[in-house]
Amino acid sequence: MRVRRATPFSRVSGILLGVLIAALAYAPYAVSRGTQTQLVLLFCYVLLGTMWNLLAGYGGMVSVGQQAYVGIGSYGLVTIADQLGVPAILAVPLAGVAAGVVALVTSFLVFRLVGGYFAIGTWVVAEVLRLVFTRVDGLGAGAGVSVGAYADLGPAQRIAVVYWLALATMVLSVLGVYLLMRSRVGLGLTAVRDDPVAAGSLGVRVAGAKRLVYVAAAVGCGMAGALIASNTLRVQPESAFSINYTAVMIFVVVIGGIGAIEGPILGALLYFLLERELAHLGALYLVLLGLIVVAFTLALPKGLWGLVTRPDRQVFPVSLTLDSSPRL
């Protein structure tokens, strides 16, 4: 009898994922610019869903204000790349760092709140930041500002660079969450989610673990905001700090499966397909999304991934399983 983490299923899945990532990396040579632009959105949806899943699914902190850090990342790209002259390839991760710094500061405020009060508090922080940026004349105030970080690149080169940046950011972020949840910190974080008082009594640093996750999720959302701004070449307060981003995160995680790394990936893919097919319906499209979320919450509380997952059938195994097969 022994315990193990990797399984034959996860090993085969890892190989297939490697092949898929390699194919996606080659895509700019094979698909149109429009397809690349759409795929950047898909990568950002996976990134945003992964960050919200880390925050709520693993950290037990339900936030409805993560659009604050999407907006900080968007404006961070403009400030760092356009005004400070930092190359765009470095400005994207630095914009995420800027969002993390803001999250670290605001955490000392919102962590005084719990439950629903915490959720509303994060939304209030996002709204305050939105109002602040509407009054910053150097960044276009309410009218917004254009992104000039890629001005020295041609259209095809810019789209390809943004595509590769988005792909690399998504892959590294998912891998980072996976490694975090495999670590002792991840084990302590799961205990904090289930019962903070009991976790604290066992020696887990509850506040530190929650703050780490909150800041890490903000960094990921900030990079997603920088990538979205790179994709659209325009940043405006109403769109950069739109609560629709948090709605997308919640949809992606609930539909895909909360508390599983694979869940947001499935949820993002489904949301991406629904957006392409149903966006022309206008307001009815949002109603349909809401009905889908309600239906999944009632019928499939573990999401799409919950239909197929088993202890020995995980792409990203984070827990140990008992292996009773005899050793040869």
Image (tube, rainbow, N blue to C red):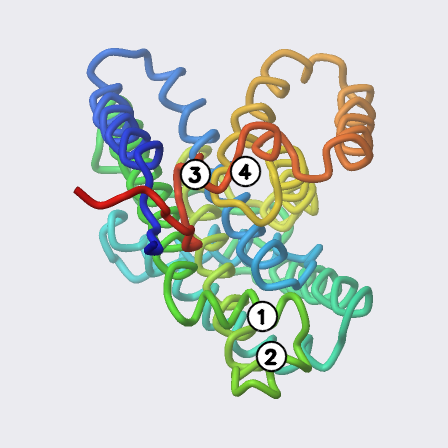
Task: Decide which of 269, 92 is in the foreground and name it.
Answer: 269
Say which residue label 1 marks.
191
Question: The C terminus lies in which quarter of the figure?
Answer: top left
Of the two numbered discs 3 and 2 on the same chain, state the one appearing first in sequence: 2
Residue 242 in view of the camera: yes
The residues bearing labels 3 and 2 have C-alpha atoms spaced at a distance of 27 Å
Percent of width and height locating residue 12: 28, 29
Q: Residue furthest left?
A: 328
**Which quarter of the picture shows residue 297?**
top right
Q: How many marks?
A: 4
Residue under the point 48% across and 42% down:
311
The residues bearing labels 4 and 2 have C-alpha atoms spaced at a distance of 26 Å
Of the two numbered discs 4 and 3 on the same chain, state the one appearing first in sequence: 4
Whether residues under marks 3 and 1 lie with C-beta atoms below 8 angstroms apart, the answer is no
Residue under the point 56% across and 85% down:
202
Say which residue label 4 marks.
263
Q: Secondary structure at mark 1?
A: helix
* Of the two numbered discs 4 and 3 in the rendering, the one whose residue sits closer to the viewer: 3
Say which residue label 3 marks.
312
Residue type at mark 4? Gly
The residues bearing labels 3 and 1 have C-alpha atoms spaced at a distance of 22 Å
* Of the two numbered discs 4 and 1 in the rendering, the one whose residue sits closer to the viewer: 1
Say which residue label 2 marks.
199
* Of the two numbered discs 3 and 2 in the rendering, the one whose residue sits closer to the viewer: 3
* Of the two numbered discs 4 and 2 in the rendering, the one whose residue sits closer to the viewer: 2
Whether residues under marks 2 and 1 lie with C-beta atoms below 8 angstroms apart, the answer is yes
Percent of width and height locating residue 228: 46, 39
Does residue 68 lie above or below 311 as drawn?
below
